Image (cartoon, rainbow, N blue to C red):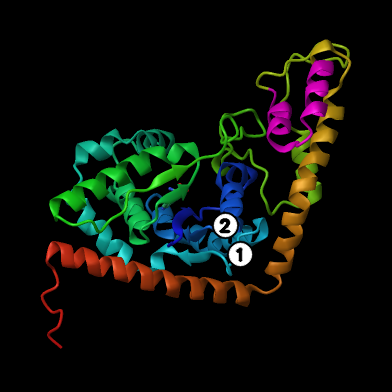
């Protein structure tokens, strides 16, 4: 039986952080290593350009960093096709064809895009490419006939919109060319890591991230600066667990649930200091981050090999996406020159 196909990706607007790691990267590696899937992992530079058109060097500089982050967490080019969105022209022709099947009103209702528009402060100056990126994302997914898309919870509206486009396309052109994808999400409550400062989201623009590329000293400093319970002033005071970032991270990263439960109890009773729980968290994080960091350093010593990996991945991605585009052109009837030499 043919393997299920996975497609997912990230915008290269900076190095990837541990929020990306728990939100999506970790799942991808697990799925990859089952051997049951054919995974495509895309660095979404064109999507990153939708709100960075005047700042392309940021994307250009991040491309190789994201590729290194991928390799560091254990994505393996022998098992996953890692490629670059802008190097796959078929994606943009598909985007154009799908755009004719989507209304402006439908795009304006997409809750993730809505939230981003607000967060980015576009006001009345929303780039058309930004508003329409869910269509381009549908092209990314359908070009590979992906049926499984491992992403963070915030991407569900993109999948919903992709499924709509697939149904509309197949119905309109009377074919069964495109495939409806399912999302694959992190376990409940683990998908979104708050920032170091207690903000609900870890994000580069908020400056509250631990990056996969941070060295041990930097991680330690960041952990020691973490938001805990502002009213927990003396060690002997009872402390709050709710909204306390250290405990949220321990819940996500510490496999030793019993110890975490005990620490929570002690903290709430009073007598357990912030410095102590932060040192403990740092140890827990290091257990997960140190091997990632070591692999990253190893790959960073041979950047040419990383580019070669992206070139090979993009070549394979082009073959697959061109095949789908050919079927899409056939379906629409834009195949006038076929078999005419
Ligand atoms: N929107 C995703 C993000 O914000 C990146 C992305 C682009 C993507 N195309 C995709 C994810 C296709 C999954 C499938 O990181």
> Residue 11's x, y, as percent?
48, 53
Q: Is residue 207 left or right of residue 136?
A: right
From the viewer's side, name the closer residue of 82 and 302: 82
Residue 245 sits in quarter = top right
Residue 259 sits in quarter = top right
> Residue 3's x, y, as percent?
46, 60
Q: Is residue 126 at all visible to an observer of this figure?
A: no
Q: Which residue is pictured at 84% across the width and 17% down the height?
A: 266
Q: Is residue 262 magenta?
A: yes
Mark 2 in CB contact with mark 1 (< 8 angstroms):
yes
What secondary structure characterizes most of the magenta part? helix
* Disc 1: which residue: 76
Residue 194 sits in quarter = top right
Residue neighbourhood size for the residue with mark 1, other residues' Cα within 10 Å, grouped as few (<14), some (14–19), many (≥20): some
Please determine whether, in this image, residue 86 is positioned above or below residue 156: below
From the viewer's side, name the closer residue of 207 and 281: 281
Q: Which residue is pictured at 57% across the width and 42% down the height?
A: 23
- Which residue sits furthest bottom? 341
* Disc 2: which residue: 32
Q: Is residue 178 left or right of residue 304?
A: left
Write down the region rendered in magenta. Answer: 244-267
From the viewer's side, name the closer residue of 183 and 43: 183
> Residue 54's x, y, as percent?
40, 56
Give the structural element (helix, strand or loop) at label 2. helix
Image quadrant holding the C terminus, namely bottom left
> Residue 50's x, y, as percent?
37, 52
Q: Which residue is pictured at 73% across the width and 24% down the height?
A: 228
Q: Which residue is pictured at 65% across the width and 55% down the height?
A: 73
Q: Is residue 287 left or right of residue 30?
A: right
């Amino acid at each position: 039986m043919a393997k299920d196909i996975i497609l997912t990706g990230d915008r290269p607007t900076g190095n990837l952080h541990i929020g990306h790691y728990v939100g999506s990267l970790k799942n991808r590696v697990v799925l990859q290593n089952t051997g049951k899937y054919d995974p495509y992992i895309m660095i979404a530079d064109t999507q990153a350009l939708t709100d960075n058109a005047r700042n392309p060097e940021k994307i250009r500089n991040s491309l190789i960093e994201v590729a290194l982050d991928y390799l560091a967490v254990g994505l393996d080019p022998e098992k996953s096709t890692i490629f670059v969105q802008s190097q796959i022209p078929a994606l943009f022709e598909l985007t154009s064809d799908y755009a004719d099947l989507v209304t402006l009103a439908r795009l304006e209702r997409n809750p993730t895009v809505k939230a981003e528009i607000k967060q980015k402060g576009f006001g009345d100056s929303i780039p058309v490419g930004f508003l329409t990126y869910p269509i381009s994302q549908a092209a990314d997914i359908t070009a590979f006939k992906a049926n499984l898309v491992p992403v963070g919870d915030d991407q569900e509206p993109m999948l919903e919109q992709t499924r709509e486009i697939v149904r509309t396309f197949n119905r309109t052109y009377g074919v069964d060319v495109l495939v409806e994808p399912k999302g694959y999400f992190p376990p409940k409550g683990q998908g979104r890591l708050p920032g170091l400062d207690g903000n609900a989201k870890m994000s580069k623009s908020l400056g509250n991230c631990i990056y996969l590329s941070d060295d041990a000293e930097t991680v330690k400093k960041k952990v020691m600066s973490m938001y805990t319970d502002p009213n927990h002033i003396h060690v002997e005071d009872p402390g709050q667990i709710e909204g306390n970032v250290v405990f949220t991270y321990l819940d996500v990263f510490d496999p030793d649930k019993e110890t975490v439960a005990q620490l929570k109890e002690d903290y709430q009773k009073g007598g357990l200091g912030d410095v102590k729980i932060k040192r403990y968290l740092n140890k827990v994080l290091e257990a997960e981050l140190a091997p990632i960091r070591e692999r990253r350093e190893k790959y960073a010593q041979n950047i040419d090999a990383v580019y070669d990996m992206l070139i090979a991945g993009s070549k394979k991605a082009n073959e697959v996406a061109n095949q789908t585009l050919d079927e899409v052109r056939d379906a629409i009837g834009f195949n006038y020159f076929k078999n005419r030499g």
